[in-house]
Image (tube, rainbow, N blue to C red):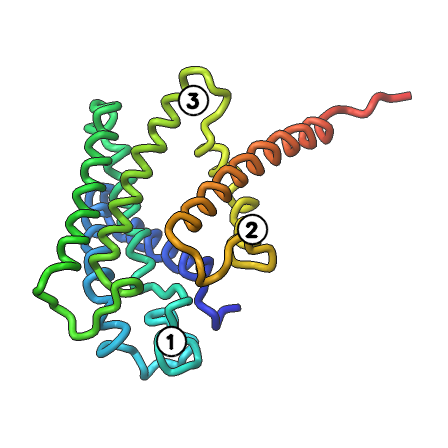
Amino acid sequence: DPDHVDVLNVIGISLLLVGLMCHLASTQARAAWIAAVVATFIVVSTPMMWSSWRPTWLPWPLESYFDGVHNTGTPQAYLFPIFPWAGFTFAGFVAGYLLLSAWARRSGFRLMGVVALAGLALALLGRTLDHSSVQLYSYYDFWHTSPNYFLIRTGFLLMILALCYLRWGFGDRGLKRSPVITLGQHSLMVYWVHIEFVYGRLCILKRQGMGIFGASLGLITITVAMVLLATYYGKWESVRRKKMLTPVPQT
């Protein structure tokens, strides 16, 4: 639904914006700097975009891509507008550029230690700023528009990235395939199935009634289940592909 700004909508728009940025930038390094500036702008301007900067002069289907207003007249927290969600795409571009740089290739395993520490520093910085007595915004919604929450989430993503590298290391030391790689190779299937168990008709958790322990247990359960799904779906797909490529014997 083009009028309902959901996850796939903002992913598509974000990829288009990153592609345009790469086309305009003359070098990868310049593109990374531009991505850092764009991510910073998106993050720090999100509280205003949801309040005083709302582009109300646009038709609501277009305005919704900026502030998630839909047709209600006020921003809706369950939607995924460009502000702040596209900021993760540009931040990810910067992280990807650094991980593929010559310095990263020389650093090897030590780089993941730097990434993990940087993630921890960002998460602690976001929490510290959120608890500070100094507030820069008249409109402040920690869970939906706060730059501090963006810092915390980005910090955790960097720590998870470091953990993924460790898993790849174990995979290179004898496991057949890294679970992270397996999830990535079958991400569309995993996305479709997990939506049903997390948000859909087959939801395994009580909505709006879970504590930290229950939610954590649900997260572990769904993660393990999706890894198993991706693993066995990949095996089934390989068998099916081999059968399709096997020539039929002539009689």
Identity of the amino acid at label 2?
Trp
Q: CA distance from mark 3 to mark 1?
A: 45 Å
Secondary element at tag 2: helix
Q: Position of residue 216 (x, y in %)?
A: 41, 46
> Of callouts 3 and 1, which one flags the residue occurring earlier in the amino acid sequence?
1
Quadrant of the image occupied by residue 217: top left
Q: Crowding near pointer 1: few (<14 within 10 Å), some, many (20+)?
A: many
How crowded pointer 2 is (Cα within 10 Å; few <14, some 14-19, many 20+) is rated as few
- Mark found first going from the N terminus, 2 or 1: 1
Q: Residue at x 19, y 39 (%)?
A: 118
Which amino acid does the dot numbered 3 rest on?
A: Gly
- Give the label on residue 218, or none: none
Residue 171's disc number: 3
Disc 3 secondary structure class: helix
Sort mark 3 into few (<14), some (14-19) or many (20+) by Cα contacts within 10 Å: some
For the residues labelled 2 and 1, the Cα–Cα distance comes to: 25 Å
- Residue 69's tag is 1
Give the amino acid type for the residue marked by disc 1 in the picture. Val
Residue 251 in the image: above or below residue 138 = above
Residue found 81% across the figure and 25% down from its top = 248
Q: Which comes before the other along the chain, label 2 or label 3?
A: 3
The part of the image, by quadrant, that contains residue 38 is bottom left
Q: Where is residue 210 shown, x and y percent of the image?
A: 43, 56
**Residue annotated with mark 2:** 192
Q: Is residue 94 left or right of residue 186?
A: left
Q: Can you give x and y, in whole percent of width and height, for residue 201 in the image?
A: 60, 59
Residue 110 drawn above or below residue 145: above
- Residue 161 in the image: state x and y as whole percent: 32, 37
Residue 141 lies in what quarter of the image?
bottom left
